[in-house]
Image (cartoon, rainbow, N blue to C red):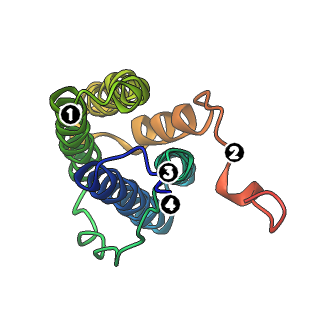
């Protein structure tokens, strides 16, 4: 007896999104490494935490597909883009990535509506709300950098921004706190 409650197309689309979330984690991890290398440890930790959040999103998709009787497929993850040239480019890259992810989430919502797959439509509402928060967070990053002076910010302004982001509240554990038992 087939217990898969997802259409073949929906199962593939959800698996694709699972992989897209892992790619986002790699992008933010890469940006975090770039920031760390530039001496922005607070910004780096902020980006590392964001990378962990994206990995968690991937797991949400994986678990949902499995819970609906499907089998998610792990695909090759594209390499992250080249290092940003500046903090402005870094934060704009974060925003662009979030907008692209929002578009993908909306496609899944549309697909669930078309298929009358109400369970998936309901599941996707969490991600719709999450993307509002993610885009707002990215816009706030760009705004904070503009206030600090953008790419012409003083070292003092960048130091303050770095320390502010280091202390930013986040319920995702810092990457440095990860262990084998608590990834």
Dot 1 and dot 2 residues touching (CB under 8 Å): no
Residue to which mark 3 is pinned:
3
- Residue 36 position, x and y percent, is 51, 62
Residue to which mark 1 is pinned:
115
The image quarter in which residue 121 lies: top left
- Indicate which disc, 4 or 2, sits on the residue closer to the N terminus: 4
Dot 4 and dot 1 residues touching (CB under 8 Å): no
- Indicate which disc, 3 or 4, sits on the residue closer to the N terminus: 3
Q: Residues within 10 Å of mark 3 (few under 14, many from 20)?
A: few
Q: Is residue 31 left or right of residue 69?
A: left
The image quarter in which residue 112 lies: top left
User: Could you say which disc has been placed on residue 173 in the image?
Assistant: 2
Gap between marks 1 and 3 measured at Cα: 17 Å
Q: Residues within 10 Å of mark 1 (few under 14, many from 20)?
A: some
Q: Residues within 10 Å of mark 2 (few under 14, many from 20)?
A: some
Gap between marks 4 and 2 measured at Cα: 21 Å
Gap between marks 1 and 2 measured at Cα: 37 Å
Q: Is residue 150 left or right of residue 25?
A: left
- Residue 99 position, x and y percent, is 20, 38
């Amino acid at each position: 007896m087939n217990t898969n409650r997802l259409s073949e197309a929906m199962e593939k689309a959800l698996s694709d999104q699972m992989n897209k979330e892992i790619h986002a984690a790699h992008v933010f991890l890469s940006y975090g490494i770039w920031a760390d290398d530039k001496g922005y440890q607070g910004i780096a930790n902020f980006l590392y935490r964001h990378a962990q959040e994206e990995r968690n999103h991937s797991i949400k998709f994986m678990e949902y597909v499995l819970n609906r009787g499907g089998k998610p497929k792990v695909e090759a993850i594209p390499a992250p883009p080249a290092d940003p040239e500046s903090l402005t480019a870094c934060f704009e890259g974060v925003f662009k990535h979030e907008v692209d992810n929002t578009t993908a989430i909306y496609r899944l919502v549309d697909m669930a509506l078309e298929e009358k797959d109400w369970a998936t439509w309901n599941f996707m509402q969490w991600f719709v709300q999450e993307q509002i928060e993610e885009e707002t967070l990215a816009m706030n990053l760009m705004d904070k950098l503009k206030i600090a002076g953008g790419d012409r910010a003083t070292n003092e302004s960048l130091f303050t921004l770095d320390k502010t982001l280091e202390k930013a509240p986040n319920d995702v554990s810092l990457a440095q706190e990860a262990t084998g038992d608590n990834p």
